[in-house]
Amino acid sequence: MEIIGANDQVPGREATVTTPAFRSLLYREPRLYDLVFPEADESISRMVYTAIDRWLPAMPRSILDLGCGTGRHLGVLAKTIPGCCGVDLLESNVAYAKAGHPGITFHVGDMRTVRLGRTFDLVTCLGNALSYALGDDDLNGTIGTFAAHAHAGTLLVVDPLNARAYLEGDGFQEQVEGRVDTPGFKATSVSVHQLDRQARVLKRTRTWHVIGQADEEDYAEYQLLLPEEVQRLLEPAGFEILGMYDNRELQPTDLTGRITTEADVSAMRGRKLYVFARRR
Ligand SMILES: C[S@@+](CC[C@H](N)C(=O)[O-])C[C@H]1O[C@@H](n2cnc3c(N)ncnc32)[C@H](O)[C@@H]1O
């Protein structure tokens, strides 16, 4: 398995990848991630295409997706973007992404440190992958990675969790119960959340109940970001903010992350900031 980390400038050299601070059944068995969060309407990819139409002069020739997970967004974008590359911290996700998308390049790598030695026309970090960067060092490291892989005019698309929705709005729910009922996976889950208001960190413990199996417990911490913080992080790294929205339809709002009742399997609707920026 090709692993790219802090000391690598080109693909192919081995380096240490940091042990993740999170664990999830859906990452240990990535096929379950796509069943639980199916993206059947491809609304994320459609949002990326809207941004391309709006802010790039032509269809990008290359894209880097950091925290790419199962590679599902690249799988859609690869239909029109020839040079697709995905990076994820977890070998399990990268192995699954490679098997599902043989024409796309995937690497195991840490978005806080990875260096591929080239730039891309489009850089994405979706599915709130940026929120896995906890604290200033992780955030600055990740944004340094965005900058290192961007040239003048590169479009950046990121969707961290919106701190305003959790701290000031209806985003925080102490307990969330879920049910998955697909031919490939039947389970219920209970997520218990804790909110550290000072650090602006959301902690989630999720217990999966699958009939006939022992319960499995996931754990993750997410950095919540205020819109003005995102701007303060990106601008010094050479990115000009083009737009920030709390919806995938790119409707201008006050960015308070109002939770709507519209269908959204990941129950994140209104809780994310969709950020579009261009490298100067
Ligand atoms: C919620 S998933 C989103 C996956 C994908 N972007 C999507 O939208 O379907 C978050 C992903 O970020 C990855 N991730 C978390 N920390 C990372 C890091 N430091 N470097 C690279 N990937 C990371 C996880 O392994 C996981 O695949």
Image (spheres, rainbow, N blue to C red):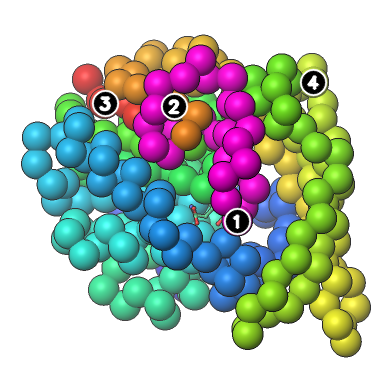
Mark 1: amino acid:
Val
Which secondary structure, mark 3? strand
The residue at 26%/40% (across/down) is: 50
Q: Where does the magenta region start and end?
A: 248-275
- Camera-side residue of 237 and 126: 126
143 falls in the magenta region: no
Q: How many marks?
A: 4
For this orientation, the residue located farthest to the front is: 261
Nearer to us of marks 3 and 1 is 1
Label 2: few (<14), some or many (≥20) within 10 Å? many
- CB at mark 3 closer than 8 A to ligand 1? no
The residue at 59%/19% (across/down) is: 256
Label 1: few (<14), some or many (≥20) within 10 Å? few
Q: In the figure, 270 relative to 255: above or below?
A: below
- Camera-side residue of 115 and 263: 263
Whole-angstrom CA distance, mark 4 to mark 3, is 31 Å
Q: Position of residue 191 (x, y in %)?
A: 82, 52
Q: Earlier in the sequence, mark 3 or mark 2?
A: 2
Determine which of the numbered discs, if any, sits on residue 265 in the image. Answer: 1
Q: Earlier in the sequence, mark 1 or mark 2?
A: 2
- Camera-side residue of 12 and 123: 123
Which secondary structure, mark 1? loop
Determine which of the numbered discs, if any, sits on residue 278 in the image. Answer: 3
The residue at 41%/60% (across/down) is: 41
Q: Earlier in the sequence, mark 3 or mark 1?
A: 1
Mark 3: amino acid:
Arg
Q: What residue sits right under mark 2 in the picture?
A: 245
Which secondary structure, mark 2? strand
Mark 2: amino acid:
Tyr
Whole-angstrom CA distance, mark 1 to mark 4, is 26 Å
